[in-house]
Image: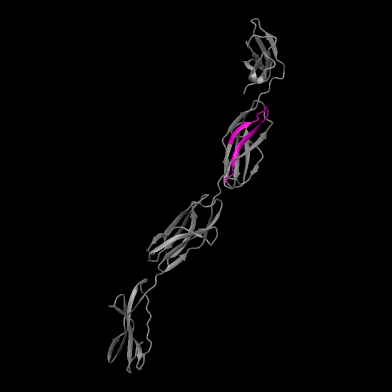
Amino acid sequence: TVNPNGFATGSYFEYGTTTAYGSQTATNNAGSGSSGVAVNAGLSGLGAGTSYHYRVVAVNAGGSVNGADQGFTTGVPVPSATTLAASGVTTSGAGLNGTVNPNGFATGSYFEYGTTTAYGSKTTTNNAGSGSSGVAVNAGLSGLGAGTSYHYRVVAVNAGGSVSGADQGFTTGVPAPVATTLAASGVTTSGAVLNGTVNPNGFATGSYFEYGTTTAYGSKTATNGLDAGSVAVSVDANISGLPSGSTTHFRLVASGAGGMAIGADQVFTTIVPMPSSSAEVRMMGDGSMRMTFTGSAGATITVLGSSDPSVPMSGWTVMGVSVETSPGVFEFIDIGAATASMRFYGTRTE
């Protein structure tokens, strides 16, 4: 305020970063009254976050007078923050990305994240510097739930306040199941039971077996559904209609939202049936016995024998292994001295 004390008076303000001031506003007419009148001036182009001194000066024919020194500090501009797309998303983690412009003042940044836009979690605060252009900021997350959607945003903070980037989202991946092919069981002349284990890794999974005469497979069993467990469970499938004595390759395949898992190749050979005709037993001149079977060409036959009819077959001894003397005809030669009580049983050898 200025009181002209009855004479035409002008007024202006001196201002600067020290009490030496150094700058002044334009002079305005304060009138010639005898009481205080309000005077004011607007300043612009000042430095942000800067302390200034100022005082009012009144001038008339009687001289000039200065008001007491006053001061103010200009505000600090808030930073700007932009949330960018996540990167490196896995089943349990992701990289959060953004840019922050400190707008010339020391600024920190962090990310808020959670399964909703209420977030609820945040990363540690990192220094974004005090520059005047955008800088990249990022943070890595781990320990997240698989197959879960998350929201996140970057937050920048300085003396001027805080600002949040726009919301972004990502969904963690689903782990693939684990498939292990096990040995076949219950092999017969025309089929077998295929076995394996599947770990669904927490998500609904289907499984089936591929099989065929080569590792190109070509056939598959029906698909079975598995619950979303996290431990390995046994799976099996019965296949039939295979040629006797044939070799079959097979493997277990498991498929879920996270992808497909394929077990290792396994192999089994169907049993060759015993010859359908009766064996011919001949006594040889040296007291040994010769037995002849007719059957499938290429078969391998082992003869088990026991001189005591009461001994279970599991206790019989191997008397000899076949020799294919002509296509489909197998002879056991010199399999031991014959006695009236000796009996023989033929079975194929895998």
Q: How many marks?
A: 0
Q: Give residue 191's position: percent from left, percent from top.
A: 67, 30
In the displayed structure, 141 sits above or below 282; it is: below
Q: Which span of residues is magenta-colored?
A: 181-201
In the displayed structure, 282 sits above or below 211; it is: above
Q: Give residue 30's position: percent from left, percent from top.
A: 35, 89
Q: Which residue sits furthest front? A: 310
Q: Would you say 225 lies left or right of 89 here?
A: right
- 189 magenta-colored: yes
Q: In the rendered image, is residue 31 in sight?
A: yes
Q: Would you say 23 lies left or right of 337 here?
A: left
Could you say which quadrant of the image residue 277 lies in? top right
Looking at the rendered image, the quarter that the C terminus falls into is top right
Q: In the rendered image, is residue 321 in sight?
A: no
Q: Nearer the viewer, residue 177 or 30?
A: 177
Q: Which residue sits furthest top? A: 285
Query: Is the image coloured rainbow, by chain, by secondary structure, or in one colour?
Result: one colour
Q: Give residue 258's position: percent from left, percent from top.
A: 57, 47
Q: Give residue 182's position: percent from left, percent from top.
A: 59, 34
Principal SS element in the magenta part? strand
Q: Would you say 110 lies left or right of 31 here?
A: right
